[in-house]
Image (cartoon, grey):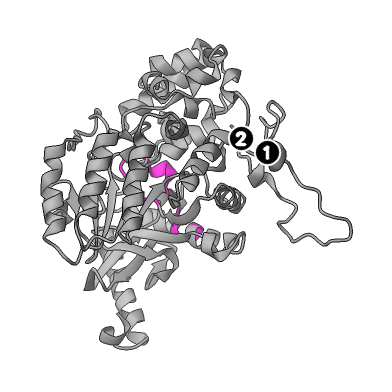
Amino acid sequence: MPDPARSTSASHLFPLKPDLERETPQAGLRSPTLGDDLSHRQLLEGEFWRHLPAYADVDSATFLDPSWQLQQSARSVGDLATVVGRSSDRFLSNVQAGIDRASMSLRVTPYILSLIDWENPESDPIRRQFIPLASEKLADHPISVLDALEERSCSPVDRLTHRYPDRVLFVSTDVCPTYCRYCTRSYSVGTSTISVSKHKIRAHGQRWAQPMEYIRSNPAVEDVVVSGGDTYMLKPSELRAIGMGLLDIPHVRRMRFATKGLSVLPMKLASGDGWLDALTEVAERGRALGKEVSVHTHIAHPSEITWISAQASRLLWDRGITVRNQCVLLRGVNDSAVTLRTLIRRLSYINIHPYYIFQHDFVPGVEDLRTPLHTTVRLEKLVRGATAGYNMPTFVVDLLGGGGKRDAHSFEYYDRTTGISVYVSPIIDPDALYYNFDPIDTLPPEGRERWAIRDEIPSMIQEAGRAARSAGESRGSRETTW
């Protein structure tokens, strides 16, 4: 589907609910610069999936059944062919070649498939996130590596990453309802591919014993991110066991359940399958104990938000559960100020707090989706003020080598020619320098030429490191500055 920040091609097919219609300013009142743009309220309505021949006869009861969604998810080019038809053989061949070279396996729900503009899938922002094309593939950056954030090296016990003093990442499962091409955990999430043999982390109660015991024995840990994979794929009993178990640990004050479900399978929350009830039980007990239980979701483009998403968000709101959004900045998907403004305002409109926008991690096989740092910094300037400050996301870089998250603009040094930026992370390691690298195809010719010479790479990194240390020293001693 075309970017709703630029057009709303499907809006004429389905009527908007009265409270979502464009409002007319009162006569004599001056509208703010962005005040006339109410496109963030125009959610896709009706049985929008019926425009696809494969779903033309699918009624609402069936389409809104999460079990049907999972059973009918596309896992192969053959499955896609049933949706788009054999008339798209050239496109499907492109997809097959892309799958053969991808680090993530294919799994896409009918809900997401129905949001793609199949008249022009090559440039569609939803398709770019989930379905690979060989024609888009760029050579991996020389620095690119699986687990670039070194989650496993910061793992004191299996299924748990402990990088920050008071926070841990609890990896509860390796399964998702839909697999994102750019998943930072592509070393373990999903089934193995031709290019990647996965490190498997299956959901199983006994396998949670070690991380639970580690958290229990570390009183500094106050914040737990329960992630995966996707916590949407936990059974209600498993979700309840993890949540209640964490609440039983006195020093755990906050927990966040991470799921992309509100983007790819929003109807699950209204299905009555018990997942929302289990989450609510955990949240209500947490509130009684003075502890926070929240949901962190991942919506990257405004077209992912439909009336179904709004309904799902409202169910969480009615249960008193805070929802925050953290997404990745993706080239050709959401790397424009107009798109991000619409996304931020649309999320806010359905009571989801925009929280983080990440600089794309170094995931092999998806260099075509990464953006240079200067794009991230520029976009932050252009979108700030689009809505209230408490609903403005922070633009961050999750640093290579386990340096953690830093504000994108907080680099010590940035060379636009080589694309190398340097950060410090005093809480993680006050003596270390952490590096970030722009996509080589976005560099000027002289930068691309240097990266083409393998022997130049160490020199470029050393130059950037010296420049960063010099910049730090010019602001004062390392002890007081970093």
Q: Which residues are magenta?
A: 360-375
| Residue beneath the point at 35% across and 22% down | 75
Quadrant (top left/top right/bottom left/bottom right) for the N terminus:
top right
Question: Looking at the image, do the residues carrying marks 1 and 2 touch, with CB atoms under 8 Å apart?
Answer: yes
User: Does residue 173 belong to the magenta stretch?
Assistant: no
Residue type at mark 1 is Ser
To which residue does mark 2 refer?
2
Callout 1: SS: loop
State the residue in front, 390 or 88.
Answer: 390
Looking at the image, residue 395 sits to the left or right of residue 159; the answer is right
SS type, badge 2? loop
Q: Position of residue 252 (x, y in %)?
A: 24, 60
197 or 163: nearer the eye? 163
Q: Relative to residue 453, is residue 231 depicted above or below?
A: above
Q: Which residue is mark 1?
A: 7
Q: Residue at x 62, y 51 (%)?
A: 338
Residue 112 picture location, percent across and down = 48, 29
Quadrant assignment, res 107: top left
